[in-house]
Amino acid sequence: MRLSIDSSSFAKRYIQENGSDKLDDLLQRASTLALSVILVPEIISGLNRRLREGPLTGNNYRKAKKQLLDDVRDTTVLQLTPAVISQSVKLLENNVLRAMDALHVACALEWEADLFVTSDKRQFDAAINSGLQTKYLGQPNA
């Protein structure tokens, strides 16, 4: 299975929360994993926010960052090509969606992912509307 995951779901590898176990199961089933080029900065931003606000210790931040960078080495990194940008514009015009979320969906579409995974409801709706097979990990028992 060609699996593409957005930042909101991939972060569940580093911060245990609802959906972390389901993400691990999906990763085990994937034959190829692809992540948007914006995923690492988005996850690092979220980890730093948790570090500043206190739920994450400095030691756990360093461990999570190392694991993230190690994980990304083994993936296909989807770039922001003219086709991805064009697709993201269409997504933004036809959905209630943030720009970065549109880029994740556009990357998955251009890569022709078999499954796109997100924990963001609006992104889920946009991905479904665009024809992507999509899994939502954002709610209890998703």
Image: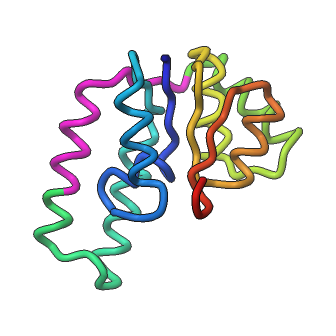
Say whether residue 41 is left or right of residue 57: right
Res 28 → quadrant? top left
Query: What residue appears at the point 40 percent right and 54 percent down from the top-left corner?
Result: 20
> Measured from the top left, where is residue 135 in percent x and y?
62, 39
* Percent position of residue 11, x then y: 39, 53
Q: Write down the quadrant of residue 118 in the picture.
A: top right
Model colouring? rainbow
Give the residues in magenta: 64-80
Q: Position of residue 117 (x, y in %)?
A: 56, 39
**Where 3 sits versus 111, above or below?**
below
- The residue most toward the right is 94
The mark total stands at 0
**Percent x, y for residue 19?**
48, 55
Vertical arrangement, residue 132 with respect to residue 100, above or below: above
Q: Is 44 left or right of 127, judged from the image as shown?
A: left
Q: Decide whether residue 68 is among the magenta residues.
A: yes
Write down the quadrant of residue 62 in the picture: bottom left
- In the rendered structure, does residue 45 fall within the stretch colored magenta? no
Foreground residue among 2 and 29? 29
Q: Residue at x 39, y 51 (%)?
A: 21
**Left or right of 132: which side holds 114?**
left
Q: Residue furthest left?
A: 59
Q: Residue furthest bottom?
A: 54
- Compare residues 54 and 85 and report the one nearer the observer: 54
User: Is 56 drawn above or below residue 36 in the view shown?
Assistant: below
User: What residue is rendered at 52% in x and 42% in y?
Assistant: 6
Quick check: 93 above or below 35?
below
Q: Residue at x 33, y 56 (%)?
A: 44
